[in-house]
Image: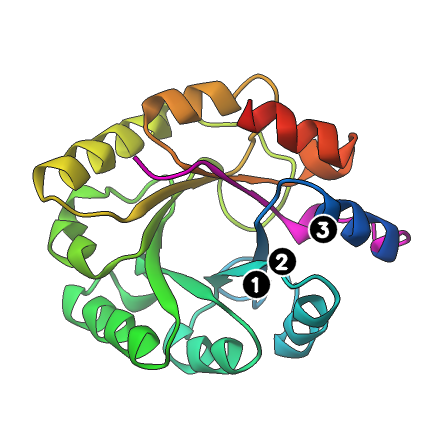
Amino acid sequence: MNEIVIAPSILSLDYSNVSAQLEELKASKAKWLHFDVMDGHFVPNLTFGPDILKGFKKACPLFMDVHLMVEDPKTYAPIFIQNGADLVTFHTEALDNDLSRIQGLLDEIHNLGAKGGIVVKPNTAIEPFESVLKSCDLVLVMSVEPGFGGQKFMADMLKKVEWLKEKRQELNLSYRIEIDGGINQDTYKSALDAGCDTLVAGSYVFKNDITKTIEGMLA
């Protein structure tokens, strides 16, 4: 069983109070930071580039969990690794769900010294990617449509989590199972019970007492 990890999403950081919130994070039990990269094409929103990642890594040296929501993850994965990404996940849909291309990018990420994994949108089935699970350090299940924070949790996505948990055991693998979207006081327990060991939480962490909220999810 993997240790439970909370990965606060800096998409929900209060950007008028960055230093104080990062100090709170460093003092909390959070070990990861979730860094959402959106290109305005793969998803309609536009967020952070590699220089911002480098700045966050310097200011808050937690494990950097970089989630690429971009049309061209093959180009951008190496750039973000060079700028501090410890783990890079990319959407299968960005590579047309092509197993050969997905495997190739996972191999490249590992060759560059980072951990790697795949992400699926709510409408994408997880089962077709069984053959690449052996090369994943983490699989991220989206429990909202990617692109914007603050959406409602889609509970039916927990079926994917349960399948991933069963496959991990069946194939004797050790990848982490992460969920992203709508995680709060009402949903985090359901995600953990289904088999998640890594929770991305944005608004729930940054709009409440950061330390207490993270400790509550780990209790």
Q: Is residue 3 magenta?
A: yes
Q: Position of residue 87 (x, y in %)?
A: 44, 63
Above or below: residue 187 compared with residue 5 = above
Q: Residue 185, how many percent across, how many down?
A: 61, 20
Residue 213 visible in the snapshot:
yes
User: Quick one: label 3, few (<14), some, or many (20+) residues within 10 Å?
Assistant: some
Residue at horizontal 29 percent and vertical 45 percent from the top: 124
- The span from disc 3 to disc 1 (Cα, nearest Å) is 25 Å
Which callout, 3 or 1, points to the residue nearer the camera? Answer: 3
Dot 1: within a 10 Å radius of its alpha carbon, few (fewer than 14), some, or many (20 or more) residues?
many
Residue that numbered label 3 is attached to? 26
Which callout, 1 or 2, points to the residue nearer the camera? Answer: 1
Count the marks: how many?
3
Tell me where residue 176 sits by quadrant: top left
Q: Nearer the viewer, residue 81 or 113?
A: 113
Mark 2: amino acid: Asn
* Outermost right residue: 16
Residue type at the position of mark 1: Met
The span picked out in magenta is 1-18
From the image, tell me which residue sits under label 1: 38
At a point 16% along the width and 56% down the height, the residue shown is 134
164 to the left or right of 189: left
Q: Nearer the viewer, mark 2 or mark 3?
A: 3
- Do the CB atoms of the residues marked 3 and 1 lie less than 8 Å apart? no
Q: Mark 1 to mark 2: distance in Å?
A: 6 Å
Residue labelled with disc 2: 45
Looking at the image, residue 96 sits to the left or right of residue 185; the answer is left
Q: The residue under label 3 is which amino acid type?
A: Lys
